[in-house]
Image (cartoon, grey):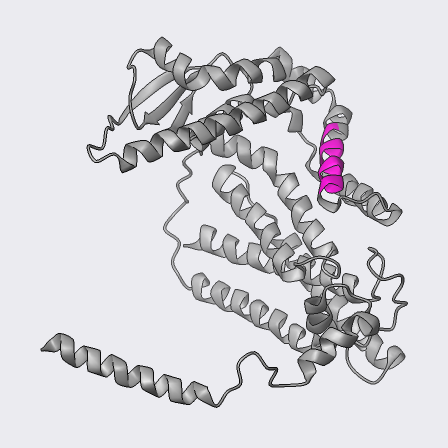
Amino acid sequence: MKKIISLILLFIICLGIVFCLQDIPFGAAKTKVGHYYIDNGREETGATNIVTSVVLNYRGFDTLGEVTILFLAAIGLGAVLATLKKKGKRQIEPASLILKTGCRFLFPLILLFGAYIFIHGHLTPGGGFQGGAIIASAFLLVYLGCRERKINEVANKITESIAGLVFIVMGLIGLTVGGHYFLSNFMPKGEINTLFSSGIIPIIYIAIGFKVGSELTGIIDNLMEKS
Amino acid sequence: MKEKAHVKNSDLKNFIYLFFILFVIWLVLTTSFHWQEIIVGIFISFILALYLHKNYLELGLPKITVKKIIYFIMYIIVLFIEVVKANFDVAYRVLHPKLPIKPGIVIIKTKLKQDIAKTILANSITLTPGTFTLDIEEDELLIHWIYVRSEEEIEATKIIGEKFEKYLRVVFA
């Protein structure tokens, strides 16, 4: 009996969904703006990666907001964890040889890979956020593998602040010099599909890479040290 | 002790080694010899190597020679073949209705001295399905085995470790 009722209910729900979705044309674009980006993004911004051209050029202001949200999350976490009492000195149990060696060997290589991702943000998939996350993962590996080491918190904060400042200053320069909106591309766009192209986009992405990397590292540091 | 003192004296060697590794990886990642890529690659490799080169060679990284590169490539091929073979073996054990497993932990010995060599050996053993490195203690590797063929240390070393180790011994000679 139960099964029959649930089958009937499932049928009703299916019917409802089918009727609801019938009116929406499948596969057709609902807005025109998407096609505009695809057709003109390359020429207008000089970035081969269309996602990047949207994230940093057409919607650059939103990206500033996203970075700020991450910043606030890091600060909030720090504030919450700061109220916790410290349970004496953290017990440091040395990591196994495999983890320790792997950490020491891979740390520079992961940093290089993160840098590669955010420097090539306008050419290949990826960008500042992804590169920053990769860099933070390298620091997480240090916390797991070489447990006696600590990151320099002051340097971390300074890096984060400078990166944020670079972002905003570039945007303001764009506002005053280049055009009539925040983050307008005032630098020469260069030859498409080369590393030094698409004006301010690589610079902004490098700044975002540093900012996200240092923010996430700060979060990891907070979680590891204070809890 | 002697080796450590020797390493400490060669900061420049550390730096050049790390710089070289980083730059090669950069070239592999970009797969382009455009002058802009090369300039940025040199710049980043230089900065990273400048800050992180300290004691890098202490891990026991080998000198790079043609022979060692060839042996390392052979090692990678052997590792690949072993991984495929072990996959079939484990799949057979899982799918067999009688489940012919005999799990257990064995100790194997390694003659490799350097930390990085031991790590590579341990990771290749972990990468092949069926065997799993739990820990390294001096020259002994603690290994969990899905079907313990031999509890003897020498015999187990021969079955699990030797096929990788004979190449790694040349690379890290």
A75 horizontally vs B71: left or right: left
Q: Is residue A195 above or below residue B123?
A: below
A225 horizontally vs A193: left or right: left
Quadrant location of the C terminus of chain A? bottom left
Q: Nearer the viewer, residue A185 or B48?
A: A185
Magenta residues, start to end: B17-28
Quadrant location of the N terminus of chain A? bottom left
Q: Position of residue A181 (x, y in %)?
A: 79, 83
At x 53% / y 15%, what residue is drawn? B113
Which image quarter: residue B53? top right
Main structural element of the magenta stretch: helix, strand or loop?
helix
Q: Is residue A50 above or below residue A123?
A: below
At x 58% / y 34%, what residue is drawn? A104
Q: Any magenta on residue A192?
A: no
At x 61% / y 58%, what residue is drawn? A130
Q: Is residue A55 above or below residue B173?
A: below
Q: Nearer the viewer, residue A16 or B107?
A: A16
Which image quarter: residue B108? top left
At x 81% / y 77%, what residue is drawn? A184
